[in-house]
Amino acid sequence: MSNTRTQVAIVGAGPSGLLLGQLLHRAGIEAIILERQTAEHVLGRIRAGILEQVCIDLLDEAGVGQRMHSVGLVHGGFEIMYGGKRHRIDMNRLTGGKNVMVYGQTELTRDLMDAREEAGLPGIYDVRRVSVLDFDTARPRVRYEKDGEAHEIECDFIAGCDGFHGVCRASVPRKDISEFEKVYPFGWLGLLADTPPVGDELIYINSPRGFSLCSQRSRTRSRYYLQVPLTNRVEEWTDEAFWQELRLRLDDEGRDKLVTGPSLEKSIAPLRSFVAEPMRFGRMFLAGDAAHIVPPTGAKGLNLAATDVKYLSGALIEFYRDRSEAGINAYSQRCLRRIWKAERFSWWFTQLMHCFPEDSSITRKFQEAELDYLLHSESGSRTIAENYVGLPLDFGE
Ligand code: RFL
Ligand code: PHB
């Protein structure tokens, strides 16, 4: 077995792990990043597409914001459609000038990977049998196998950035962790295509045939989603069937403008609300999807991961620079306060926009009345806008 020492061992090279590694590197703190998949596999996953201002600022702070600012699209509003009619949420006006950025998770991940390569600190990919040990002591360790050889890293801290199915949260004794979960009775079928988006802005559609979302990655690349039953398999959906169903959920203007084409990627994601409490276990921290999952309706998953990393990097920098444990001790509580508000918004927006299999006709009427109220009330629309652009970091302080 080969042995190495580092300050922070990071498990997982998704956006959370890579961003944490980059922020620590800029503060002169050593980290090793371990990833179960290959780099190509990580870059092949099509996930989030919307960044909040807090996330944009953090990427700038990490020194990786250049490409995002040059090719990302700034959006000051989005549309909500129900009863066949569209209503615009003017986020910019309703929030006093805030916007979001359309920039895909794949691009952001690539920027972070490139920055690590440039610093001569590439992550260790394609590792097997990762285990986290002794995190309740001052000398935690991480073991893994690479190309059939066993390795051990001795470190000061472990950052569990290994997503929902990772090993870090699963290694915590059950008595020390509480989990809260809701699984939704449908999934999102996503399709990526090199076709111009159907609208300038995103369109969230409440249709009696099920929810649909028209999103985008650039002016020439669209991302669309359809609510589908959990029993559907992606192989059952031809591109033609997808486009046909999307047309049925759109309005006349959308049907006219929709440009179809071959899919670059198609996948089904289940929808879940999940939070693990706390997010610190001695010298191991959880960040991002390892600790919480939101249904994608509010576009919050990646943005929440970024704020966890902001708090965690700040706490670790404070520890090494000032010998202070204040940030570390406050980490879990600070994150969870923000997480629960984003969880609530994502759950609420999901139940407002989707068809639930058990819905009675009266529930559908309540949904329509709520939308009618929110979209014609200044304060109702502002509530949606201020949650969508992301609450300020010091909200409620
Ligand atoms: P990630 O991106 O899941 O990265 C975790 C990484 O850890 C690796 N890993 C391990 N590595 C070493 N050892 C182990 N034992 C390991 N176990 C796992 C994994 O291979 C992976 O590379 O979590 P992170 O970094 O916290 O980032 C969070 C975001 O990825 C996530 O919140 C969003 O993508 C959520 N999400 C979406 N969010 C949105 O805002 N909008 C979306 O449209 C959207 N679509 C999605 C999504 C998440 C999905 N998942 C997780 C299934 C679509 C999907 C399919
Ligand atoms: C996406 O572009 O993938 C996307 C955008 C907004 C969402 C969810 C997904 O709410």
Image (spheres, grey):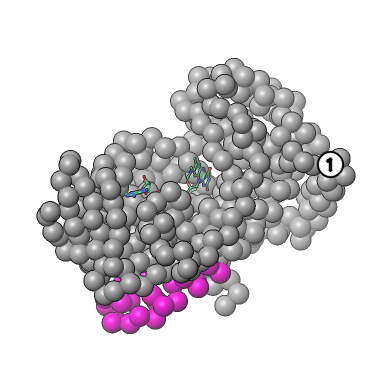
Say which residue label 1 marks. 360
x then y, percent, for residue 317: 31, 72
The residue furthest left is 2
Figure quadrant of the C terminus: bottom right
Q: Is residue 255 left or right of residue 177?
A: right
x then y, percent, for residue 364: 82, 42
Snapshot quadrant of residue 128: top left
Snapshot quadrant of residue 246: top right
Is any atom of residue 65 visible in this view? no
Query: Bounds of the magenta span?
Result: 312-337
Q: Nearer the viewer, residue 138 or 299?
A: 138
Say above or below: 176 vs 237: below
- Count every numbered label the image shows and give the total: 1
x then y, percent, for residue 37: 31, 41
- Queried whether the magenta region covers residue 314, the answer comes back as yes
Figure quadrant of the N terminus: bottom left
- The kind of residue on which mark 1 rests is Ser
Q: Nearer the viewer, residue 370 or 174?
A: 174
| Other-residue count near label 1 (Cα within 10 Å), few / some / many at <14 / 14–19 / ≥20 | few
Q: Is residue 121 left or right of residue 266?
A: left
